[in-house]
Amino acid sequence: MDAKAPITQDVMTIPRKLPDGPQNLIGLSRDQLRDALIAAGTSEKQAKMRASQIWQWIYHWGVRDFAQMTNLAKDYRAMLAETFVIAVPEVVTRQISEDGTRKYLCRIAGGHEVEVVYIPETDRGTLCISSQVGCTLTCSFCHTGTQKLVRNLTAAEIIGQVMLARDDLDEWPEPGAPTKQNRLLSNIVLMGMGEPLYNFESVRDAMKIAMDPHGIQLSRRRITLSTSGVVPEIARTAEEIGCQLAVSFHATTDEVRDRLVPINKRWNIETLLDALRVYPKVSNSERITFEYVMLDGINDSDNDARRLIKLIDGIPAKINLIPFNEWPGAPYKRSSNNRIRAFADIIYNAGYASPVRKPRGEDIMAACGQLKSATERARKSRAEIAADAGL
Ligand code: SAH
Ligand code: SF4
């Protein structure tokens, strides 16, 4: 971390505490929303229509206050306000990097915290969202993997991250204004904290809300889910979400991958590749992204690059090289720029796109693999990290 980098930090404490009683409408599917309205006394005949109206207020217009839902009768709005809330995670701090990257630390029920990162680019903007507090997996190069405490996020907490970022970017549509062509938040990547496929249902339900044509309306092609390789859930991702898939591949032999991505001991490289071979066909997604973190002397040789090409033969793929982002106590070093370039060239010459992911927001510890709730006390010792890495 560069101590001289200008960091702006402002504390936004939004008192959106969830009272015990009222039910949160965020995160419910359309059917669940309709059922909740029926349970609150709305007639079955009217419920579908009311659910559509409320859905549009919440997810198209970004309204959080029932009083503003002006196409509903006044006493109906009052009933809603007594029975329900519309609550997204509370933003505790927001940091803005010198490169424009924004990192939000958010508080969720139980006092837990998750990080959400917004990465602006010239013609689009990507929100990197979290699916768990911490991660049950222990990839030896990943900061999140050193965090012990874990709980799955609810669908509300996952879609809530998208909503709070749109709040901060002031990107809900103005009534009557023409639809914006270039959105600030145009893409979502499930590459924050946690393994999304170990929280499948909530991730799926939240992404269905993000894709709904009467709300946030992001195309499934603009959503990328990154997994460390939870093989049994990969086909389900294609069938039930249909988004783009990225895989944390990171090694070309089982021996090295066992050390870097320990889930490989359960589902090895061959099993993983078998699942990936059928993915693009099932989901109509064009290409699978193979993420490959560049670790000095561990997985970055020319032979690794050649083996990688052989392994993925026949899979529509692009390879995303990620220079290792260091964190305190990390047992690895980043490969040199020359090494990364040489590795990328071999892949490129074999006919694959091989972009090198530019680290973003490093000055605020927002880059890939650096996320970890700052206030999290239960952390692993250096010795435990080294033992997990087989060092
Ligand atoms: N759990 C999921 C998604 C979150 S991690 C997964 O593992 O795919 C998002 C990406 O960042 C993964 O490819 C992960 O391997 C990579 N990553 C983790 N730690 C990193 C680090 N320190 N430097 C660079 N990339 C890292
Ligand atoms: Fe978990 Fe992904 Fe980090 Fe591995 S790389 S510990 S799966 S968040």
Image (cartoon, rainbow, N blue to C red):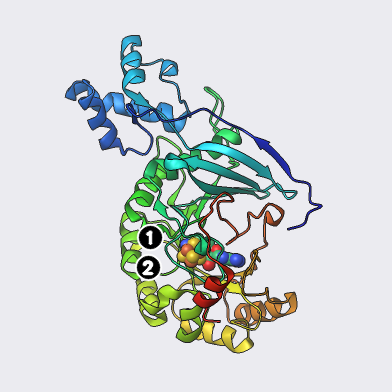
Residue 221 horizontal side relative to residue 328, left or right? left
Q: Up-down: is 75 above or below 125? A: above
Q: Is residue 306 visible?
A: yes
Q: Position of residue 378 (x, y in %)?
A: 50, 57
Residue lying at 44% horizontally and 79% vertically, measured from the top left: 314
Please name whichever residue, 290 or 285, is drawn nearer the observer in this view of the structure. 290
Residue 287, can we see it?
no
Does residue 115 appear left or right of residue 111 in this picture? right
Residue kind at label 1, given as amino acid type: Leu
Left or right placement of residue 318 versus residue 208 in this view: right
Q: Splitting the image into four quadrants, where does ligand 1 fall? A: bottom right
Circles 1 and 2: CB atoms closer than 8 Å = yes
Which residue is at a point 56% across and 29% down the rendered structure image?
178
* Residue receiving disc 1: 197
Q: CA distance from mark 1 to mark 2?
A: 6 Å
Point out which mark residue 230 bears.
Answer: 2
Nearer to us in this view, 181 or 78: 78
- Report the residue at 56% width, 73% height from top: 383
